[in-house]
Image (tube, rainbow, N blue to C red):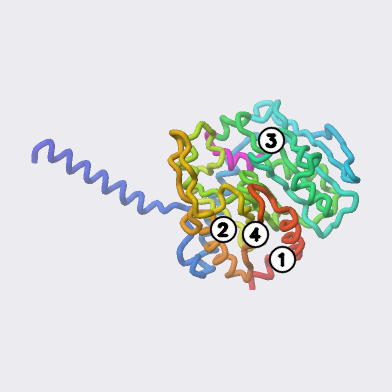
Amino acid sequence: MNFRSLILLLSAFISLFFSFECIAKKHPDEIPLEAVLGDDEIFQQWSMKFKKDYTRQINSIENITPVSSRVEKKVIKENVKLLTISFTYPVASTLSGNEGGGILAIPSVIDQEKPIIIAIHGHEFSPWGKYPDGLFLKEKWPWELVKNGYVVWAPVSMYHQEIKQVAEKNGYLPSWVKIISEGINHIESRYLLTIPHSNYAALGVSAGGQTAYSLMAYRNDISMGVFAGAEQPLDFLRREYHLKNHPNCWDFPGIASYTAIQALIAPRPVQFQMGRHDPWFPSGEPFPKIGNWFPGTSRDVISDEIGGHILILRALWKAHKNDVSYHLHSGGHEMDSKAAIIFLQKKRNFKEDNYNE
């Protein structure tokens, strides 16, 4: 055997070895087909394993726990108390010196049977990485919830440049989840002890919706969720959107599909919302070509996470005698607050044990 033949044989062996390695290392977030077809035992086995990996990935993000806080400002608007709560982070934290904390909105009359709302805005609301008091002062969707008797915590969200070093290592989406979760733990022990409530509900729009369902998958004390305009397919964003001069703030490293994250929520009540005038609505018309960075693509309702994932999620929820709500409204890239309030009211008495018979 000559030298060239030996090299070719060695190359073939190496290729075969790595092929077997790829086959052996199944993607941990891949939902088993048997689970989608109704085998709840297999789903539970997968869910327990993936939840450990998912939780470990988020928990690995360190040094973003607030060490102290204070009320920076108090505003009364139509009998609603708006508290701007400022967090202080460790000196070595990536958030040290940046605005951190959020707005705690407390109505004059509190219904202790209602959950506290974690309201997370996305790129649709600015400025990013700042106190989102405009959500209330300009009477955006969280204001509707407060006026309906919900206590609302609107955390500072959509950090970009402030957490670049951490996010490039761990991902923006996991980092946002950890930052918001640590903030919830902080206000829970310092500001919510005297506020009667029944658990939490996570609501968000756009990237805030993605953060909301990722947070709900991470925390078991979030009983309900509403996610509006958060139906962007991960494979599309990785394939097309990353070509634009924009940070990969939509990405969750190591995850092949947002659907797997959403599946970890089962069987807690959730509602996805999509406006018929949202750019992501599958109207049958492809996205147009934009410059030299985006060649255009379709928004097929079945093949991506705009609609196809709902079929999978509903199959998983069905095993627990529950369902996933998908609300279409006449608006755009926004939250239908009235529909969200109706959903929260309808599902307020949900008890997970009722679906595990």
Q: Secondary structure at mark 2?
A: helix
One can see residue 137 in this view = yes
Please name the residue shown 87% across and 49% down the image: 107
- The residues bearing labels 3 and 2 have C-alpha atoms spaced at a distance of 30 Å
Mark closest to the chain's N terminus, 2 or 4: 2
- Residue 263 — which label? 2
In the rendered image, which residue does mark 1 sit on? 351
Please state which amino acid type lies under the numbered disc 3.
Ser
Please identify, in this view, whether the residue under mark 3 or under mark 1 is nearer the observer. Answer: 3
One can see residue 219 in this view = no
- The residues bearing labels 3 and 1 have C-alpha atoms spaced at a distance of 36 Å
Please state which amino acid type lies under the numbered disc 4.
His
Q: Secondary structure at mark 1?
A: loop
In the rendered image, which residue does mark 4 sit on? 327
In the rendered image, which residue does mark 3 sit on? 126
Disc 2 and disc 1 in contact, CB within 8 angstroms: no
- The residues bearing labels 2 and 4 have C-alpha atoms spaced at a distance of 18 Å
Question: What range is drawn magenta here?
Answer: 168-179
Q: Main secondary structure of the magenta part?
A: helix
Mark closest to the chain's N terminus, 4 or 1: 4
What is the x, y in percent for residue 229?
A: 62, 49
